[in-house]
Amino acid sequence: MLVTGSLGFVGQHLMRRLAEVGHEPVGRDRELDVTDVGALEAALDTIDPDAAVHLAAQASVAVAAEAQELTSRVNFLGSRGVLEAFSRRRPGARIVFVGSGEVYGLTEPGAAPFDESAPLRPRSAYARTKACADLLAGDYAARGLDVVRVRPFSHTGPGQTDTFVVPSFAKQLAEIAAGRREPLLQVGNLESVRDLLDVEDVVEAYTRLLDPEVPAGVYNLASGVGRRIADVLQALTDHAGVEPRIEIDPNKHRPTDHGVGNADRLRRATGWEPRVDFDVTLARVFNDWRERIRAA
């Protein structure tokens, strides 16, 4: 089994989970150019995978806004490379194609969660590349490739970089708690609402979608619970035991967004349910950064 992006945040968690349940995952990261179909074909001939999880991507919305050409290359052309190489060399393999819940855009507070029938209305450079790649994967599926398109909403956990909102808060709070930063926390828009999952629940879903008995198609991966970012921040400050001043950083501020997903289709097909309590998730993220700060 091939995992692209295996050294990334989710990739490392997924590699461990796959090994735990008896798979023999082979990871490839930046040493394999996923935009190079010839290199991918050679890798498939060597690895001989019966399945794949395509994680390799530029995953940060903020970075995508600053590096749109790179993001398009990795997220769209990289996806095309993987799909094309499998169609040529391993057309019977199951491919779990990891997209994003950001492809749906935003909705009004109180609106019904997005299901898989919702139109794709991406609002950021990152979301546009993922939407294009998602549609391309659908085209390969229509031509007979065994592609499962999964659209995960926001997720976090130990090991995630601080370009994402939860680890950004956790890192700053850990620095404040350790006396390495003045008690001032820089934040973006605290009124936004996110659907947040623990990374362990996310990799469990990917693992279940590898089962060839699960019908190919499109699956949202979401908790179905909207969490206001201000409430997430308060819970993290409780874990840290500090009460810093809050300052809005214009570089972090994005328009208020509200996006929650409906994962009923995934539940029916696989029996998946989110298992990790969100307060446990926040504690894990904070403790991860506290240990990093201590070791620095």
Image (spheres, grey):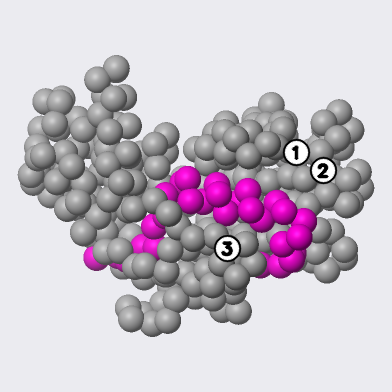
Asked if residue 202 lies in the magenta stretch, the reply is yes
Q: Is residue 278 left or right of residue 119?
A: left
Q: State if disc 3 and disc 1 touch (CB < 8 Å).
A: no
Task: Name which of mark 1 and mark 3 comes first in the sequence.
Answer: 1
Name the element at disc 3.
loop
Q: Give the answer, above or below, for where 19 lies relative to 264.
A: above
Q: Nearer the viewer, mark 1 or mark 3?
A: 3
> Where's residue 65, x and y in %?
47, 52
The quarter of the picture where residue 25 lies is: top right
Q: Give the answer, above or below, for where 215 lies relative to 108.
A: above
Q: Nearer the viewer, residue 273 or 284?
A: 273
Q: Which residues are magenta?
A: 191-219
Q: Residue at x 62, y 45 (%)?
A: 55
Task: Name which of mark 1 and mark 2 comes first in the sequence.
Answer: 1
Q: How packed is label 2: few (under 14 Cα within 10 Å), some, or many (20 or more)? A: some
Q: Residue at x 87, y 65 (%)?
A: 143
Q: State if disc 2 and disc 1 touch (CB < 8 Å).
A: yes
Can you say which quadrant of the picture contains the N terminus? top right
Q: Nearer the viewer, residue 137 or 224?
A: 224
Can you say which quadrant of the picture contains the C terminus? top left
- Residue 1: which numbered mark, if any? 1
Q: Which residue is mark 3?
A: 271
Task: Name which of mark 2 and mark 3 comes first in the sequence.
Answer: 2
The quarter of the picture where residue 24 lies is: top right
Q: Give the answer, above or below, for where 191 lies relative to 242.
A: below
Q: Is residue 2 left or right of residue 283?
A: right
Which three-letter amino acid code belongs to the residue tagged 3?
Gly
Q: Is residue 219 visible?
A: no
